[in-house]
Image: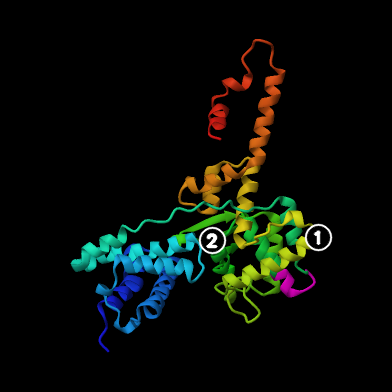
Amino acid sequence: MKPTDFSKSLTDFLSLYLPGEKGSGKNTINAYKDTFILFLKFMQEEKSINASKLMLNDITQECIIEFLDWVQKNRHCTIATRNARLAAVHSFFRYLQYRNPIHLHEWQRILSIPIKKTEKPTANYMTLDGIKLLLEQPDQSTKKGKRDLTLLSLMYDSGARIQEIIDLTPSSINLNKPYTVKLSGKGNKSRIVPLMENQVKILADYMELYRFTESYAGKYPLFSNGRGEKFSRMGITLMLKKYAEKAKKIDYSLIPQNMTPHVLRHSKAMHLLQAGINLLYIRDFLGHTSITTTEIYARMDTKSKREALEKVYVEVTNGKNGSTPLWYEDTELMEWLKSF
């Protein structure tokens, strides 16, 4: 069967351009691949065009808009998911502008499709008491319970993304001072994160139990499921939800309603901020590219805002009659208050 221009272009885009010229990470490539699997399904079901016959001139701006609406309505996806699918489509057609400009006008029409506006959800995070309660749930008398405690506590202590935890190997852990873990994040960027002594003790016991301290085990998955395979995202999410449900039965108020692995990362970031750690350090700790991403935690930190306002109130009431309040001369605090 002769390949179509669409199949050739998509194959080159996913297998050559993204990993080679653009240097995209495997998670980005997988997400884009999933988008086009859905697109092929849409074209088959809604347009009666089989993947083996789909040509580039079959794809128009109207077709892409219909696909996005189908993703949102028929598959009951959120606006955020719709926008993620559109981002993948945009990337492909930006690539086609230079590789196949014969349909340049249509590619530009597709690229003009705007991202839908959506409210940014407030990130859930837990208090220190909530984290402590959650980590008390795995049964430490069992091998599986020790694994689960180690995984969840390391995810919190390092502020790791779920994929970063999945990709860890024993060689990523440094059990000698200074204790660290090497995390490989978005865009294949790596960072070294310090670990606390309590976390290191849990890790060392776990690695000894599973014989990960042996030299031959350096590249094994640090965490694996019951079949000895690398954990999936769903596997870790289900494990976390199981322990969250157990913790809720003890104190419902300490566990968020929507518990996901990212809640542990948000919680670590908030606890660092509340401990007085500079946002720049938190940015590097989390592996954010821009400080703008990290600033969400400053906007969420109502506790610190309340304490600052209480401090202002005390200084006003304690000021001498006719004098300028002390806080009024604090330029940094004034600018901060104006930013509310």
- Work out which quarter of the rendered image holds the N terminus and state it: bottom left
The residue closer to the viewer here, 56 or 75, is 75
Q: Is 153 situated left or right of 295 in this image?
A: right
Q: Is 281 situated left or right of 137 in this image?
A: left
The residue segment tinted magenta is 140-147
State the SS at label 2.
Answer: strand
Task: Identify the disc placed on residue 292.
Answer: none
The residue closer to the viewer here, 81 or 337, is 81
The tag earlier along the polypeptide, 2 or 1, is: 2
Specify whether residue 310 is painted magenta: no
Which residue is denoted by mark 2 in the rendering? 183
Which residue is denoted by mark 1 in the rendering? 250
Query: Is there any visible trace of residue 26 in the rendered image?
Result: no
The residue closer to the viewer here, 69 or 278, is 69
Q: Main secondary structure of the magenta part?
A: helix
Image location of residue 138, percent across then percent down: 75, 67
Q: Furthest-bottom residue in view? A: 1
Q: Furthest-left residue in view? A: 102
The residue closer to the viewer here, 94 or 133, is 94
